[in-house]
Amino acid sequence: MKALFMGLGYIGLPTAAVAAKSGIEVIGVDINQSVVDTINRGEIHIIEPELDKLVKDVVSKGQLRATTKPENADVFLIVVPTPFKQNHRADISYVENATKSVIPHLNPGNLFIIESTSPVMTTEKIADLIFKTRPELKGQIFIAYCPERVLPGNVIFELEHNDRVIGGVNEESSQKAIEFYKTFVKGNLHITNARTAEMCKLTENSSRDVQIAFANELSIICDKAGINVWELIELANKHPRVNILQPGSGVGGHCIAVDPWFIVTDFPEQAQIIKRARETNDYKADWCANKVIESCNQFEAKNNREPIVACMGLAFKPDIDDLRESPAKYITSRIISEAHAQVLVVEPNIRCHKTFNLIDHKEAYQKADIVAWLVKHKEFLKYSSTPKKVEFDFCGINKIIKDVRFKR
């Protein structure tokens, strides 16, 4: 079996490598020549535990190779981004362009799968695009949708062991996709139709977004009331039927911060709670930035000089290098542009950044007058709050300390 993956990013590359490990001949396609060259050297361009070893192994054995142009294969997978536009509508142009590039290489009997998170009915629209260009393929190829559901930082394990929901445009396509995923997925494979599979992915992430919004809103309330939100949640979760999540500086990433909008824009009258949750989590980032900026103003007025602020973390979650839709990155940008302060930016998982001048976390903490804990990276867990500094713990770095402070 020969499988071609369109997109070698945070999901495409790990999935391609796992499939290659199972014995499938895998061709990975990416428009970035640097990414292609890196992978063909047996190296990786992203941070993900165990991925470097896996890619090195499958490339050295000739099971995975990368290129910038698609070619003939048995299975075609679309694993490209689906960001949203300014109006929060999904931008499926990446999916469309990737599809157009493989259409000349499709042949009867091929399996075409979309893994990119997509609005409902996207798979059917893409099928129409294929058949409009190649009408002779109608009824001759299999088309399905199968979204990923993995946790950054544990992607390799979850790609193999998590259950997958697979929905074809018809029963035959669903079955054909099931056969393909059986080659490398040890979890259960649940069959449905394409629309339900698309909505399932959006529903999973919207559910998470709503739960996080509750925790984030609670943290804002507790700050106003002078209550330690971490202690409160720990106590509330002693109830046998309560499981409140941990608050943070917002919600980021390529899924939870984006996918709910796909439902809201298509069903604006019905998706009231989903919309409100999304707005709450976006507001939390502004709330955090405002707290730090206000503290900078107070410090300057009291000390007659601008403070030094350490923004600790840029990624959208702990211990990864992914900055997509990151609230920490947004908060840092606002502090830099609006606060009267010298801002030190820390992100231990990135060596350099084209926008931010990064600094070591030890040096930043030592120099800072104000510390904003934005991401709970493992490097930060050894720090304890000190009365010598103004500290904003937006992610639970010091949550076990009873006097953890959201400075008012």
Image (cartoon, helix red, strand yellow):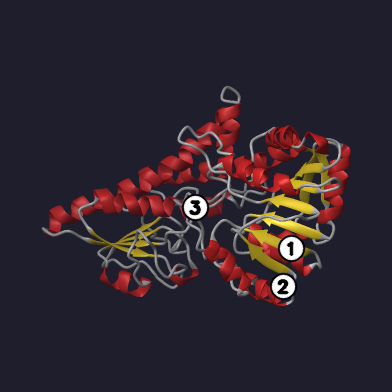
Indicate the quadrant where residue 126 lies. top right
Q: Is residue 19 visible in the rendered structure shown here?
A: no
**On the rendered image, what quadrant is the N terminus found in?**
bottom right
Q: Is residue 55 visible in the rendered structure shown here?
A: yes
Question: Does the CB distance between marks 2 and 1 fall below 8 Å?
Answer: yes
User: Which residue position holds label 3?
Assistant: 324
Q: Residues within 10 Å of mark 3 (few under 14, many from 20)?
A: some
User: Which residue position holds label 1?
Assistant: 26
Marks 3 and 2 sit apart, C-alpha to C-alpha, by: 28 Å
Mark 3: amino acid: Arg
The nearer-to-camera label among 3 and 2 is 2
User: Which residue position holds label 2?
Assistant: 58
Indicate the quadrant where residue 314 lies. bottom left
The numbered mark, 1 or 3, whose residue comes first in the sequence reads 1
Question: Does the CB distance between marks 3 and 2 fall below 8 Å?
Answer: no
Q: Image height check: is 42 above or below 318?
A: below
Image spot of residue 33 (x, y percent) = 54, 62
Residue drawn at x 70%, y 66% as measured from the top left: 17
